[in-house]
Amino acid sequence: MDVTAAVVRQAGGPFAIETLALEAIRPDEVLVRIVGTGLCHTDLVVRDQVLPTPLPAVLGHEGAGVVEAVGERVSGLAPGDHVVLGFAACRDCAQCRAGHPSYCEHFAALNFGGCRADGSKCLHDGSSQISSHFFGQSSFATHAVLAAHNAVKVAKDVPLALLGPLGCGIMTGAGTVFHALDLHEGESLLVIGGGPVGLSAVMAARVRGAARIVLADPVASRREAALDLGASDVIDVAGGDLAQQVKQILPEGVSCVLDSSGVVQAIEGGVAALAPRGRLAMVGVPRSLDAAISLNIVQMLSRGLKVCGVTEGDADPQIFLPQLIDLYRQGRFPFDRLIATYPLDRINEAVTDQHAGRCVKVVLIMPE
Ligand SMILES: [Zn+2]
Ligand SMILES: [Zn+2]
């Protein structure tokens, strides 16, 4: 079948709207008509080839849509079901079986390889193959073919077009607070970076009953958004040393830090802001694959600090997305307030607007 897709042909972009041919599904796959798909920082990191999915490629990894066809070996999904597309995991390795699919041994190949596990691609432009299955889905397109176990069936009483970001950016922020940091009631959280990941962390910290939620970002509109969503305090990172600013608010330091910036200086400032037995989670992808932080060993052991990296909130989308949707229904996780919608053919304008801070989270709406 023919699909309309946003294609990246050279490092740095732009996205070009093209008609491509999509292969038929295999026995363990489903065909999903994409309704909306989020635009995530990782799409742009790959567009710029910091992470090298082979080009040309259809990116997009926060898709939500309607199942149109299921392969003969698929159970639990049927045409008409509403689904959110999670990241790809094999569901068979030790990490997957232990309930940590974001650390799947095949994560890099399955999510960034631009193909299925066997190396095949399902998109063509008539003369050559186009990388598909980005994060198992390549959802900057009107339709996607994906492994059935990466589709999460969701209820039909919630706005399907807006649900896609739950599968990556929002899950990353909220999952890190719930799982990796395991923030407890009465603790404090510093969030570095007020993009969709950071603001999702603010909402999750509120759900957990945090005593103080501090958001640090250089952009005033993002600091205001954080206050609207439940942050108790905000810091302008341009206003001086991060740790000193945190200690003006929390003199003994902060219980937990979530860094969504990937900026070395900010992460080191976050470590310096921790209270004894504090923990810091790094979730932001740095601009260089060689980026490294330095930790003072005596400070680490004498203060009992923990620093970890987290992918996709250490969440299993099949379990976590229904939980987030329940919190949304209860009015405790209003992620829809982060979202601005753009039609797919305005994707380049959406990238510019998101980068400039004119919107927090873009969801691209597919043409009918
Ligand atoms: Zn696995
Ligand atoms: Zn993402």
Image: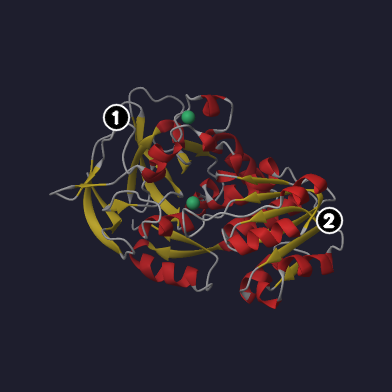
* Quadrant occupied by the N terminus: top left
Quadrant in which residue 75 is drawn = top left
Mark 1 is surrounded, within 10 Å at the Cα level, by few (under 14), some (14 to 19) or many (20 or more) other residues, namely: some
Q: Is residue 343 left or right of residue 255?
A: left
Image quadrant occupied by the C terminus: bottom left
Query: How is the model colour-coded?
Result: secondary structure
Q: Which mark is residue 188?
A: none
The residue indicated by pointer 2 is 211
| Residue 239 vs residue 222, the one in the foreground | 239
Residue depicted at 69% across the width and 74% down the height: 236
The nearer-to-camera label among 1 and 2 is: 2
- Check disc 1 and report its element: helix, strand or loop: loop
Q: Residue at x 85, y 50 (%)?
A: 186
> In the rendered image, is residue 193 in sight?
no
Name the amino acid type tagged 2: Ala
Q: Which residue is mark 1?
A: 26
Q: Amino acid at mark 1?
A: Arg
Q: Going from the N terminus, do you reach mark 1 or mark 2 first?
A: 1
Q: Residue at x 55, y 49 (%)?
A: 166
**In-front residue for pair 259/194:** 259
In this view, the residue in front, 7 or 54, is 54
